[in-house]
Image: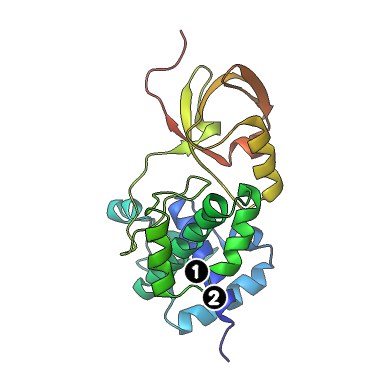
Amino acid sequence: MNMPTEKVDEYLETIFKLGCANQEVNITQIAEYLGVSPASVSEMVKRMEAQGLVQCRRRGKGVMAGPRAKDKEEGRGSVRGRSKDVSLTPRGEKMARTLIRRHRLSERFLTDMLGIDWESAHQEACKLEHVISPEVEERLAEVLGNPATCPHGHPIPDGKGKMPAMDILPLTHLKVGEKGRIDRVEEEQPQMLQYLATLGLLPNVEVEVREIAPFNGPFLVRVGKSQYALGREVASKIWMKKRVGTVRK
């Protein structure tokens, strides 16, 4: 039985994004990301493997321990399950990069041309990415001036699917006194995006960590002349380019 195209697309994008995040991810984490049961994820992976979109390798039998250096640069990663690794095949990865490109171009169109707020653009782009043709994709990129990133700061693959290598880390990895510039924020939660926008925590904004509360407490950060306490869950969704040599003595 053929799987719904949009469902396949959703899984391709998820596996690609989790690989780009350089995480070791199991079936449960994929399920949490998509809001479905682990059993549903396992069944879907089996079907996608049969279609040649993903490949699974059992641990202990020549499995891939993690993405190679070149793979990291190109945004390619593997997704760990409890007993096997799951990675996109070349065909699956090509499809995922195309979807990501169309999605992020759609977000740019929605925010830059139509004035849609950035917390709504992601959900609307999820609908558009499935119906954009190659011709419309290229025309859209041309009209928008071939943007490098989406409104949330994520890189847009070029026409060949390539993305630049980025050296970024979550805000939660910064120490007291360290500064960084926001590179991107995770776009899956509209309410969080709206909240961050009210605080001015947007891509290209500089942030300084002033205090870190003990026992997994919040991060006190300075943005311009203002200071805000961010819970660790929120802070972990903000990805930074750290400035070197910014720790106060």
Q: Where is residue 157 in the image (x, y as percent from the top left)?
A: 38, 58
- Tag 2 secondary structure: helix
Reply above or below: 235 against 145. above
The residue lying furthest to the left in this view is: 70
- Mark 1: amino acid: Leu
Label 2 to label 1, Cα distance in Å? 6 Å
Q: Position of residue 67 (x, y in %)?
A: 36, 56
Viewer-proximal residue among 89 and 7: 7
Q: Residues within 10 Å of mark 1 (few under 14, many from 20)?
A: many
For the residue marked with disc 2, what is the amino acid?
Val
Q: Which residue lies furthest to the top in this view?
A: 249
Disc 1 element: helix
Residue 87 in sight in this render: no
Q: Residue at x 38, y 72 (%)?
A: 89
Residue located 39% across and 49% down the image? 148
Q: In the picture shown, does residue 11 fall above or below 243?
A: below
Q: How crowded is mark 2: few (under 14 residues within 10 Å), some or many (20 or more)?
A: some
Q: Is residue 199 shown left or right of residue 162?
A: right
Question: Which disc is residue 8 wearing?
Answer: 2
Q: Which residue is drawn at the image coordinates 43% and 63% (left, top)?
A: 140
Q: Tell me the quarter of the picture where residue 98 sits.
A: bottom left
Between residue 55 and residue 170, name the one nearer to us: 170
In which quadrant is the N terminus drawn?
bottom right
Q: How is the image coloured?
A: rainbow
Q: Residue 162 carries which label?
A: none
Relative placement, left or right, of 116 versus 63 is: right
Q: In this view, does 7 lie above or below 138?
A: below
- Residue that label 1 marks: 12
